[in-house]
Amino acid sequence: MIIYSIFLFISLLLESIIPNLINNFIPFFIISLIILVNIFHLDLKKLMIITFIFGVLYDLLYTDFIFLHGFLYAFILYVTSSFINDRKNFFLMLIFYYLSCVFYSLFIYLISFLYTNVYILDIVNIFLSSIIINTLYFIILYIIFILVNHVITNKKTFKAY
């Protein structure tokens, strides 16, 4: 849980830093963590609470909404954890990552369309231009999480003689 919280905090910071450095970029860093936390065998209820809190924190820092990202991130965590539960295949996680990013983008597009004139082609172009960096972040986190999971499981099974 602590590792997940640390990575969520880092991703929360990166969600504001990277778009300032790269124009027309939509970060999906928190969504990648939500998908990859399924590598660990953690309590879903605690994960939902932590994810909801960081979603609300995201709303307080970056948007005008209050609980939107909290519920949205918790929903994505619940759906992906129920499908990925025992099948921790990299390609399955990557497919769910892309599907979650598309769902997230469409949902935010529908909400923002109520307030401003946002065109779907603009969202699609920004989405396609930012998918490479988001995929690289996903792959790097996947490797880190696999290594951390390997270290944790070896520590638990290690017997001192």
Image (spheres, helix red, strand yellow):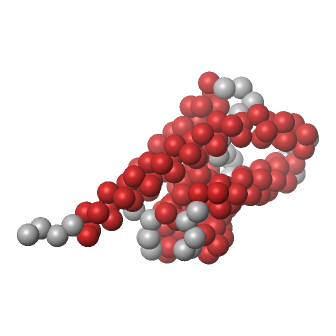
Residue 130 in view (yes/no): yes
Frontmost residue, 92 versus 99: 92
Residue furthest out toward the left? 161
Frontmost residue, 86 versus 108: 86
Is 149 drawn above or below residue 135 in the view shown?
A: below
In the displayed structure image, the side of residue 104 where residue 20 appears, left or right? left
Image coordinates of residue 88 in percent, x first then y, are: 55, 65
Is 44 drawn above or below residue 13 in the view shown?
A: below
Is 59 drawn above or below residue 83 in the view shown?
A: above
Frontmost residue, 141 versus 119: 141
* Residue at x 71% of width, y 40% of height: 131
Image coordinates of residue 160 in percent, x first then y, are: 12, 67
Residue furthest out toward the front? 161
Image coordinates of residue 23 in percent, x first then y, are: 71, 26
Q: Quadrant of the N terminus?
A: bottom left
Residue 52 in view (yes/no): no
* Numbered-mark total: 0
Q: Quadrant of the C terminus?
A: bottom left
* Residue at x 91% of width, y 40% of height: 121
Q: Image quarter for residue 33?
A: bottom right
* Residue at x 45% of width, y 53% of height: 145
In the displayed structure image, the side of residue 31 where residue 153 appears, left or right? left
Image coordinates of residue 80 in percent, x first then y, are: 63, 67
* Residue at x 49% of width, y 67% of height: 47
